[in-house]
Amino acid sequence: MLRIYFQCFENAAIASRQYAMQYPQRSHFSRKVFSRLARRLRETGNVQPIQVPRRIRRTRIEENIINVLAYVQYDPTLSTRNISNDLGLPRTIVHEILQENKMHPYHIVLHQALKDTDYDNRLNHCHWVLNMIRENPNFLSLILWTDEATFSSAGGVNLHNMHYWSEQNPHWMRQVEHQNRWSLNVWCGIVEGKILGPHFFDQTLNGERFLEFLNVFLPPLLEDVSLETRRNMWFQLDGCPAHYNRNVREHLDEQYPNRIIGRGSLFPWPARSPDLTCLDFYLWGRLKDMVFQEKPTTRENMMERIRNAIRSLSRAEIEAAVFSTATRLNKCIENDGRHFEHL
């Protein structure tokens, strides 16, 4: 910031614009911040934040503003509590300074890695679904969205307290590795604003067990779905090996002729696209937030928590999540098939 300021002959307004052009992914500060930073360098010979003794309450003076902004510039992952403790400022003052300077606590985003060949497949799928929505605005509610998820005794990553203070979204992401002690493999479906299931697989899912589920367990789950919807229902599933089993595909072709959205069908599901199905971007995260508020004690305890969590979800909430898929499809197209949830 100081280098650009002096290169611009100490013109703070020009320096502010030049800094924003050279570093578009960083926080952008007003001209006042540049002039104050230069003045502090001349007066103290130091550009580092001034350490204030703990527990000394200070008003929101210019020096505090510069110190708080310098802290998040130096380490954007600092919490307001840490900044408050180090500077001796009330947390409310720290929050006000960050908010007035348009800083937002962006949360970490975990995302599925994409391959170069995935972009066109995702775009083709998005364009096709949007065309179907234009022909029938209720098309999304006619799709039986299906998926399986693992609920492990180890729980999940708590994203609530992980944030990155920045004026612009830094697209902060982190890879995770799950280590399961014991787990449940859960199937759920969403259609017509209802959640079907849960159904628990006692063993590793394969083609034979999934076909058994389709023949034996799925029909009772569909009894609450209207006859009109069942007649026109599309079946969506991702491309896991159990779904791609030959007997499974033959069964689905017979039950849902030309109405399958999945691997190897006339309307293929794009690989590695959990951000386009409401079970992945909505349901599983919603359920795990509720189930893992306290650590489950046994498999039976976890199963009951999952059932209770599903019963607590309203139809309005579920329908809102389903119809938000259209917005996601448009976002995916705008970003050329790449990740869009950070936009």
Image: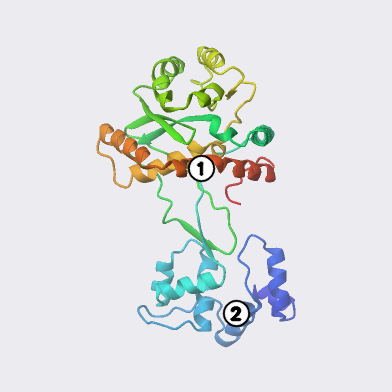
In the rendered view, does 296 fall on the left or right side of 339? left
Q: Nearer the viewer, residue 197 or 184?
A: 197
- Badge 2: few (under 14), some or many (20 or more) residues near its Cα, within 10 Å? many
> Does residue 240 appear anywhere in the picture?
no
Q: Position of residue 174 (x, y in %)?
A: 50, 47
Residue at point 64%, 45% (across, down): 331
Image x and y of residue 18, in percent:
72, 70
Q: Secondary structure at mark 2?
A: helix
Residue 38: x and y in percent read 62, 81
Residue pictured at 51% horizontal, 76% vertical = 67
Q: How many marks?
A: 2
Contact check, label 1 and label 2, Cβ < 8 Å: no
Name the residue tied to disc 1. 321
- State the image coordinates of residue 95 (x, y, percent, origin top left): 46, 70
Q: What's the residue at 46%, 64% (across, down)?
A: 78
At a point 39% along the width and 29% down the height, the residue shown is 197
Q: CA distance from mark 1 to mark 2?
A: 46 Å
Q: Is residue 215 above or below residue 74?
A: above
Q: Is residue 16 visible?
A: yes
Secondary structure beneath disc 1? helix
Amino acid beneath label 2 = Leu
Nearer the camera: disc 1 or disc 2? 1
Badge 1 or badge 2: first in the primary sequence:
2
Q: What colour scheme was applied to this rendering of the protein? A: rainbow
Q: Nearer the viewer, residue 126 or 103?
A: 126
Under mark 1, the amino acid is Ala
Q: Of the numbered discs in the image, which one, if any, rests on residue 37?
A: 2
